[in-house]
Image (tube, rainbow, N blue to C red):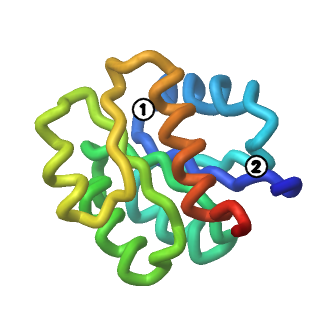
């Protein structure tokens, strides 16, 4: 895969979005990074420029990450959604909403990068 992946970072906290963008910006597989402050804005951005992967926070105003994940997977099932939360107990809710993966924000950055690699593998499976 030479073109790279497009990522949408969805979090209502500016510091969290900036941190994720800084981390993703160091990874050559990432082609473009956009950001949204809530699920409602995320849906509009996805409609406008379909990303490959969405990094979705759970707790946000206007539309939380679980509802946004349900809507994304219903309309764009090919979009990989990785839910991020400070609380591991949200893992089951994220899975029920259709998330492709879950990463606790307390984990080291390598865990998120591994989840992104797995998402890339689902987007572009190796040829047989």
Provide the secondary structure element on which disc 1 rests: loop
The residue under label 2 is 32
Whole-percent x, y for residue 71 in the image: 35, 74
Whole-percent x, y for residue 108 in the image: 44, 16
> How many residues crowd mark 2 within 10 Å: few (<14), some (14–19), many (20+)?
some
Q: Are marks 2 and 1 in contact (CB under 8 Å)?
A: no
Task: Work out whether 95 lies above or below 118.
Answer: below
Provide the secondary structure element on which disc 2 rests: strand
Answer with left or right where residue 17 lies relative to residue 65: right
Residue at 74% x, 43% y is 30
The residue under label 1 is 13
Residue at 31% x, 30% y is 104
Task: Work out whether 58 lies above or below 80.
Answer: above
> How many residues crowd mark 1 within 10 Å: few (<14), some (14–19), many (20+)?
few
Of all residues, the one furthest to the bottom in this rendering is 75
Whole-angstrom CA distance, mark 2 to mark 1, is 20 Å
């Amino acid at each position: 895969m030479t073109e790279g992946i497009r990522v949408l970072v969805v979090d209502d906290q500016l510091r969290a979005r900036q941190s994720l963008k800084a981390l993703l910006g160091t990874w050559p597989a990432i082609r473009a990074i956009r950001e949204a402050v809530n699920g409602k804005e995320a849906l509009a951005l996805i409609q406008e420029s379909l990303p490959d992967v969405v990094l979705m926070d759970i707790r946000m105003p206007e539309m939380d990450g679980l509802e946004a994940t349900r809507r994304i997977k219903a309309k764009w099932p090919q979009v990989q959604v990785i839910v991020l939360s400070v609380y591991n107990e949200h893992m089951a809710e994220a899975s029920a909403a259709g998330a492709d993966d879950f990463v606790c924000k307390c984990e080291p950055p390598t865990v998120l990068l591994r989840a992104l690699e797995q998402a890339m593998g689902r987007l572009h499976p190796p040829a047989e």
